[in-house]
Image (cartoon, rainbow, N blue to C red):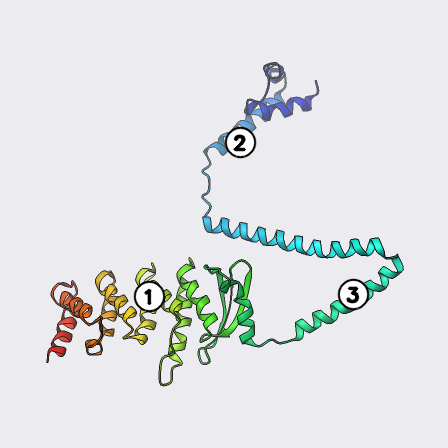
Amino acid sequence: MKHKQFEEWLQLSLYHELSEQERVLLDNHLTACEQCRCNLDELKKLHGTLAHRQSVAVQESLLQDARRNLRLRILAGAAQKSLWSKVKDVLDRILAPPVQATLGGVAMIAIGILVGYFVFKAPSEKSLAMKQTAAMEAGESQITNIRFLDRDAQTGDVEFTFETITPVHIRGNVNDEHVQKVLARTLVSDQNAGTRLRAVNMIGTQTGQKQNHVPGFDAEVKSALVSALLHDRNLGVRKEALSVLRNYLPDPVIVRAFLQVLANEKNTGLKIAAINSLDLSQYENQPVNREILEMFKNKAQSDDNNYIRIRAKTALQEIQQ
């Protein structure tokens, strides 16, 4: 039997894949072959090292990204192949080679004209934002892999990319409802705290552009800001959300969110910012008035922070005068 066969059997023997007859032949060979004995020892050491090596836990988000990218590449490759293959097969069947060459030249000219038209044609920013958010408006509920490219604090113009099913590139104004909705969904779904902070900061840019009034929020945007204020794990995101929302008081939904901050927030600075934002005189004739008074009475008596207790007592005394 050839020596190479015994070398192949060394690996199989470690996995108990040899028959009884093959194992006997290998054992007899090992007694006489020093090289194979050394190789077997090395293989045993390698298997021992691998057996003690801990497996690496892969994050689910990375697996999802990898699956999505693979699916997109497969679909893109199939589409490119199918289009040209169909055209080429038809031409091969019905046209002679000289005619094919002529038509091919005409097709190349036509393609060049079309490419030049789409490359050099400058669509408006508004239509660009409308088209590129079509996938999101069609039902995509989660924004991932957002990358901020540019921002003009003076005009409110922002530029960023994000992914739903396919990569999307946005250039528009922060006051545009489509831009705001993308930022809102980023705020509640992105895993990166820095990205969420930039998103809420960009949403707040329109507040800084106000003249005589603060522009209104879409319900989805307001809901995302309230969710960030009450539930985001990052303190900076919660503070920025509160800073934006306080400009929209005395909206009842936002008032109740501020009351929840007073009741449940662990950070004292955020609680102080919330109570300082609530002016009791603004709510005397509103349905939330009773809820606010109850919260202030509770904080005046039992809050752990001395400033909050004094602030609540002072506010109650002012409305009783």
Between 274 and 221, the one lying in front of the other is 221
Let me know if residue 195 appears in the view: no
- In the rendered structure, the answer to whether residue 245 lies left or right of residue 141 reads left
Q: State the image coordinates of residue 137 (x, y, percent, origin top left).
A: 49, 65
List the residue tagged with mark 2: 46
In the rendered image, which quarter contains the N terminus?
top right
Q: In the picture, residue 208 is in which quadrant?
A: bottom left
Q: State the image coordinates of residue 287 (x, y, percent, origin top left).
A: 22, 71
Q: Distance from label 2 to label 3 (Cα)?
A: 59 Å
List the residue tagged with mark 3: 107
Local SS, label 3: helix
Q: What type is the residue that disc 3 sits on?
A: Ala
Local SS, label 2: helix
List the residue tagged with mark 1: 226
Q: In the picture, residue 217 is in which quadrant?
A: bottom left
Q: State the image coordinates of residue 289 (x, y, percent, origin top left).
A: 19, 72
- In the rendered structure, the answer to whether residue 147 lies left or right of residue 239 reads right
Q: How many residues crowd mark 1 within 10 Å: few (<14), some (14–19), many (20+)? A: many
Q: Distance from label 3 to label 1 (Cα)?
A: 55 Å
Q: What type is the residue that disc 1 sits on?
A: Val
Is residue 42 placed above or below 290 in the rendered structure?
above
Local SS, label 1: helix
Q: Distance from label 2 to label 1 (Cα)?
A: 56 Å
Lower position in the chain sequence, tag 3 or tag 1: 3
Q: What type is the residue that disc 2 sits on?
A: Leu
